[in-house]
Amino acid sequence: MTLRRWTLSLLFLLCGSALAAGPLLLGRPGTGAGLLLAFAVLAALHSPLPFPAPLDAHEAQRRSAADGRPVVFWRPGCKYCLRLRFRLGRDAARVHWVDIWRDPRAAAVVRAANGGDETVPTVVVAGRAHTNPSVEWVRGQLSRAE
């Protein structure tokens, strides 16, 4: 399961390396380096790296019950999850993040909330699931938890 989380990032790096090889072999190192850098940035953005350390579903739900903060179920490579993460900014560290590719129980929670689909981000607050909510809504839930 761990490799699955990094597959898209590895593909970006492999494709970037292959595309950068052409200009490098033709004597254009600047173009090759630029291509490689662009694909490296894409690889990093689509990896688990931009997200806080994920919890398992059980631990996230336990913590959420204690502090009232939202639990966000996400997966690497999801552009909507990435958008939510970056738009939350510093507030992202206050949310409980659960990687559904890392935790089969989390994937089951998301499927149960979304009619069998693994649609993410799915945000759970007080036991109620919300699929792809707005950043403002998530911030509002964080404000209520304080």
Image (cartoon, helix red, strand yellow):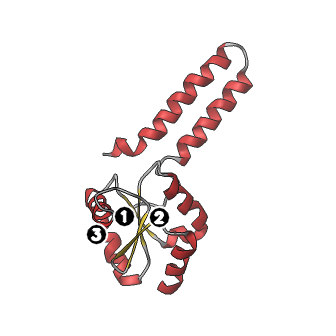
Mark with earlier residue (2, 1)? 1
> Among all residues in the image, which is located at the extreme front?
115
Cα–Cα gap, marks 2 and 1: 19 Å
Position of 46 relative to 123 (above/below) = above
Mark with earlier residue (3, 2)? 3
Residue drawn 39% across the image and 57% down it: 119
Q: Position of residue 63 (x, y in %)?
A: 36, 77
> Which class describes the residues within 10 Å of circle 1: few (<14), some (14-19), or many (20+)?
some
> Which quarter of the picture shows residue 23?
top right
| Whether label 1 touches label 3, CB < 8 Å | no
Position of 80 relative to 26 (above/below) = below
Looking at the rendered structure, the number of numbered marks drawn on it comes to 3
Q: Name the disc covering residue 58, or none.
A: 3
Residue under numbered circle 1: 55
Q: Secondary structure at mark 1?
A: loop
Hey, what amino acid is under mark 3? Answer: His
Q: Name the disc covering residue 132, or none.
A: 2
Q: Secondary structure at mark 3?
A: helix
Residue drawn 36% across the image and 83% down it: 66
Hey, what amino acid is under mark 2? Answer: Asn
